[in-house]
Image (cartoon, rainbow, N blue to C red):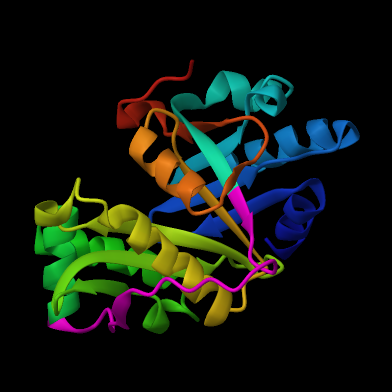
Amino acid sequence: MTNLLTRLHEVGIHMIENDSTIMLELLACMPSQLNEADYLVREIVKKRMNKKVLLETPKGILEQLPFTNTTMSKKGERIIFTKDLLEKKIISNQVYEVWSISEPRAIHFLSEVMEQGIQETEKFLQSMRSELPDQVDNILTVHYDNHIPIGVVIPHIEPDTDSEGRIFWIGLHPQYRGKGYGRNLHNIGLERLQQDFQAKTYLGATQIENEPMKNIMIANGCKHFGESVISLEYKRKNDGYRSV
């Protein structure tokens, strides 16, 4: 597996794995390495150990990956934004706290924000533990307004990158949506990435039809990063999916 990870890195494929899913990302690739990238995706599918395999890559690259393009199912399209975090100090001027994900209040509040049950919320937190074991105790960031928690942002450094900051998840409590708090919440995440995690850059993505989130990232100084990316998924045929 170590050799496979090395080869993935050489062609520009970034991989993160949790208990149920293998997530691959290929944002750029040299033309001479496209065949190798396609072969490595096939190897990951073969070794998936009954896990889902997800991939995000630009359409232009996908069209040059025959196995990937014909075997994985398109699940959506996302647009990517970036921001240089070395340019200017970010000061959100917002009140927030960092909560431990082991605290009952964290699980219950996140459940309310995500609008799902406690069991599903705990599964979400377990996937976060699996993907970010060295950071998980310092990333659940809760935004306050008038001493009331109103939203959650989860900034982190993407594993195996050169200080690339990302946001694992972001969301407002249902009672506070549509009131302009989203930009503040996102800016808290950027502030923590820059000042607490010493991230050099930020990379964020959202569904191409998600106009509010795109507007928030633009308002916070983020810029489009190349073409949109296609989100793909591979599951066995007997899981109810078929190849397309």
Q: Is residue 20 above or below residue 185?
A: above
238 in magenta:
no
Q: Position of residue 182 (x, y in %)?
A: 31, 54
Q: Where is residue 107 in the image (x, y as percent from the top left)?
A: 17, 72
Which is nearer the eye, 87 or 125?
Answer: 87
Judge left or right: residue 132 versus residue 118. right
Look at 27% across and 73% down and name the residue there.
142
Whether residue 114 can be seen here: yes
Which is nearer the eye, 199 or 92?
Answer: 92
Which is nearer the eye, 242 or 87?
Answer: 87
Judge left or right: residue 238 versus residue 1. left
Which quadrant, please, contains the N terminus? bottom right
Q: Position of residue 232 (x, y in %)?
A: 50, 32
Judge left or right: residue 19 versus residue 158. left
Query: For the view shown, which residue lies furthest in the top direction?
Result: 244
Look at 38% across and 54% down and name the residue there.
20
Judge left or right: residue 148 versus residue 171. left
Considering the whole magenta stretch, tell me its main secondary structure.
loop
The image quadrant of residue 40 is: top right
Look at 64% across and 36% down and name the residue there.
42
What stretch of residues is rendered in magenta? 82-104
Q: Where is residue 70 in the image (x, y as percent from the top left)?
A: 58, 18
96 in magenta:
yes
Whether residue 119 can be seen here: no
Q: Is residue 236 above or below residue 165?
A: above
The image quadrant of residue 167 is: bottom left
Look at 49% across and 54% down and name the residue there.
220
